């Protein structure tokens, strides 16, 4: 059988496959479905407003109204110590959620990046130590973010060539190395004492150290970080990054630069972690080697896993639970062993729901929600 025959047969098969199938007469005579009305179709509304119109639900409106009203009905303790701290820690955990949940890279150096931002703010800005330079905050904060992003990029460049447990060990080694660097260096990092009285600025007549202003400052940047991550994972870069997470060899075969996407993900997560680090330093009013020690490196991982790493909101849910346990576990058990309560709660959530609190909520909804009630009803016999 000649090659010309095979080419003719293949061309005939391709033409038949490309030919559209005839529709049934009843379907062919149906009129085309009318598109859903768009109230902004003939308006000059910006794209972000159209996006909110199509994606905003009653649940989002309720949560937004709650977080805006919260500081006016809660005590200053719950506003500053609980909510403000949870928002700052949630931002740092959000950077790990972005890396681990959408990039498949678990890093233990996110608190290190946040600590770098806190140390830069303390060294260049104002504090109780004489070695601080006293630069204005509007110069110090961009410097802190830029240096932290550069360090996060370097950490990513060193660690993305490995996978799994090796990535975790490399980032843990970097975090421990930074801890001993700031512990033993006195000329730049002031050794084990660190920096005290590192307070947020007073702009006009607003003191951002007060509970309500600090809460809204942390809330604004938390919403910005949340929306940034939600937008990034829908962009071509975010979709390619998730493809690299699922099958890096196939993405490399398609022409994507796997290493460049991973390093860029580290840089973007470093930006989110740096903002959270500045807020956390302002919340504590100090930064020391204990702020970037091994305990806090693991705590950020606990917060991210506790809330659930498959959605950005999980970082803030885990931060709220962590802060509540850290604050009130002393009333349940001895002061020196309150971490035992946190560990037990963490193990219970992980054992019953590997996806964290969000996964547990999804299981409860599927079991006891309205859809479960509908599916559990017996079908009527025809």
Image (spheres, rainbow, N blue to C red):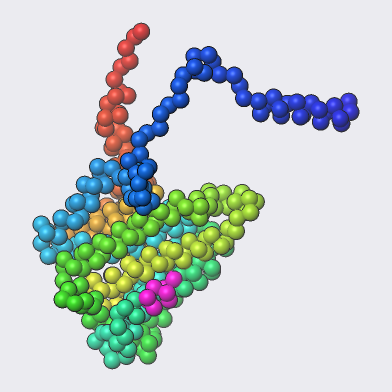
Work out whether residue 67 or residue 119 is closer to the camera in this orientation and state it.
67
Is residue 175 at least partly visible in the picture? no
Q: Is residue 304 magenta?
A: no
Where residue 292 appears, as percent x and y from the top left, is 35, 73
Q: Residue at x 22, y 81 (%)?
A: 197
Residue 77 in the image, given as x and y percentages of width and height: 13, 65
Residue at position x 29%, y 77% from top?
287
Indicate the position of residue 365 as horizontal and vertical percent values.
29, 36
Residue at x-position 53% and y-position 14%: 25
Quadrant of the rendered image containing residue 17:
top right
The answer to whether residue 143 is magenta is yes
**Quadrant in which the C terminus is drawn:** top left
Q: Which residues are magenta?
A: 142-149
Prevalent SS, magenta region: helix
Residue 200 is drawn in which quadrant?
Answer: bottom left
Q: Nearer the viewer, residue 126 or 172?
A: 126
Of residue 66 and residue 305, the one placed in the foreground of this image is 66
Q: What percent of the width, then of the height, locates residue 45?
A: 34, 50
Residue 143 appears in the rendering: yes
């Amino acid at each position: 059988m000649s090659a010309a025959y095979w080419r003719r047969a293949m061309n005939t098969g391709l033409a038949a496959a490309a030919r559209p199938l005839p529709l049934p007469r009843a379907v062919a005579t149906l009129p085309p479905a009318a598109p859903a009305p768009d109230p902004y179709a003939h308006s000059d509304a910006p794209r972000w407003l159209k996006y909110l119109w199509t994606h905003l639900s009653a649940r989002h409106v309720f949560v937004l109204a709650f977080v805006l009203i919260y500081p006016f009905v809660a005590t200053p303790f719950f506003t500053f110590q609980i909510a403000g701290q949870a928002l700052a820690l949630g931002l740092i955990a959000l950077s790990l959620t972005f890396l681990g949940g959408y990039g498949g890279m678990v890093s233990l150096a996110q608190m290190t990046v946040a600590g770098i931002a806190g140390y830069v703010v303390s060294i260049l800005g104002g504090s109780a130590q004489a070695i601080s330079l006293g630069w204005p905050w509007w110069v110090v904060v961009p410097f802190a973010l830029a240096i932290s992003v550069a360090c996060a990029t370097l950490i990513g460049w060193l660690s993305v060539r490995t996978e799994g447990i090796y990535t975790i060990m490399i980032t843990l080694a970097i975090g421990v190395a930074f801890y001993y660097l700031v512990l033993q260096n006195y000329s730049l990092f002031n050794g084990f004492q660190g920096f005290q009285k590192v307070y947020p600025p007073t702009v006009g007549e607003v003191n951002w150290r007060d509970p309500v202003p600090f809460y809204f400052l942390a809330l604004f940047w938390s919403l910005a970080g949340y929306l940034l991550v939600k937008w990034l994972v829908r962009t071509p870069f975010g979709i390619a990054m998730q493809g690299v997470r699922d099958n890096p060899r196939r993405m490399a075969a398609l022409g994507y630069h796997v290493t460049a996407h991973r390093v860029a993900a580290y840089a973007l997560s470093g930006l989110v972690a740096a903002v959270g680090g500045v807020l956390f330093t302002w919340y504590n009013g100090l930064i020391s080697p204990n702020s970037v020690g091994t305990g806090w490196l693991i705590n950020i991982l606990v917060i991210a896993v506790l809330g659930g790493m498959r959605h950005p909101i999980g970082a803030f849910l885990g931060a709220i639970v962590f802060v509540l346990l850290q604050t009130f576990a002393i009333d349940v058990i001895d002061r020196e062993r309150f971490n035992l309560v946190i560990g037990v709660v963490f193990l219970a959530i992980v054992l019953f729901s590997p996806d964290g609190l969000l996964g547990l909520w999804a299981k409860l909804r599927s079991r006891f929600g309205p859809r479960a009630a509908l599916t559990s009803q017996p079908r009527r016999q025809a």
